[in-house]
Amino acid sequence: MKPAIASRTRDRAVALSTRCQEWVDCQPPESAKGVCIDAWRRYRDVQGPLQSALLSLYIFVAILPALLVMEGYLENDPTALAKSMVEQYGLSSTTAQLVESVFSHGQQHHLGAALLAVAGALFIGINFGRVFQDVHVKAWGITLPKKRFDYPRYLAACSACTD
């Protein structure tokens, strides 16, 4: 009995998918729906979701730690940011103690934190130029020969993006 239910469910899913694909294919390209569908296809063709995930990773691995290091250098009170976060988000006393201990201990290691933030930015950022090039190559439908000096160019593109 269970295989019959699974088979019917699969058949319904296939039929729904087919109807949806037919609807998408029937949309005139000059209509608002057609333009949106074409934009989504182009976004998928250049691996837009992957590029978005890479940007999010870059923010959390490189930008956020760099901002925390800068805040540590600029603020004299090591717990000022933690206290502000506790008040802003209404954290419980246990969570507040944890946040304050993490931020106050980080204050003692300025140089290490700064070096780690720079290393994270370089490690992730050096491939950002490659990602930009890959997006443009796919969007324009061209091919580029691989060159020996690509990585220095990617690093230059990364440093131009962070300036």
Image (spheres, helix red, strand yellow):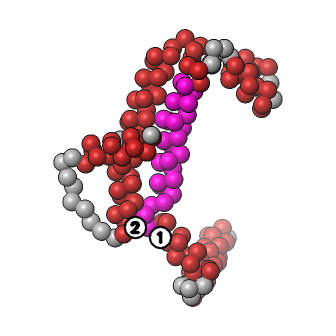
From where the camera sits, is residue 28 visible?
Answer: yes
- How many marks do you count on the picture? 2
Dot 2 and dot 1 residues touching (CB under 8 Å): yes
Residue at 48%, 60% (x, y): give it: 48
Location of residue 7 with respect to 113 vertically, above or below: below
Residue 124: where, in percent of width, then height? 41, 39
- Along the polypeptide, which appears first: circle 2 or circle 1? 1
Numbered mark located on residue 42 in the image? 1
Real-space Cα separation, disc 2 to disc 1, in angstroms: 7 Å
Q: Secondary structure at mark 2?
A: helix
Name the foreground residue: 135 vs 77: 77
Residue 4: where, in percent of width, then height? 64, 74
Tell me where the magenta segment starts and ends, as one range: 45-70
Q: Quadrant of residue 24?
A: bottom right
Residue at 40%, 44% (x, y): give it: 160
Which residue corresponds to mark 2? 139
Which amino acid type is shown beneath numbered disc 1? Answer: Arg
Which amino acid type is shown beneath numbered disc 2? Answer: Ala
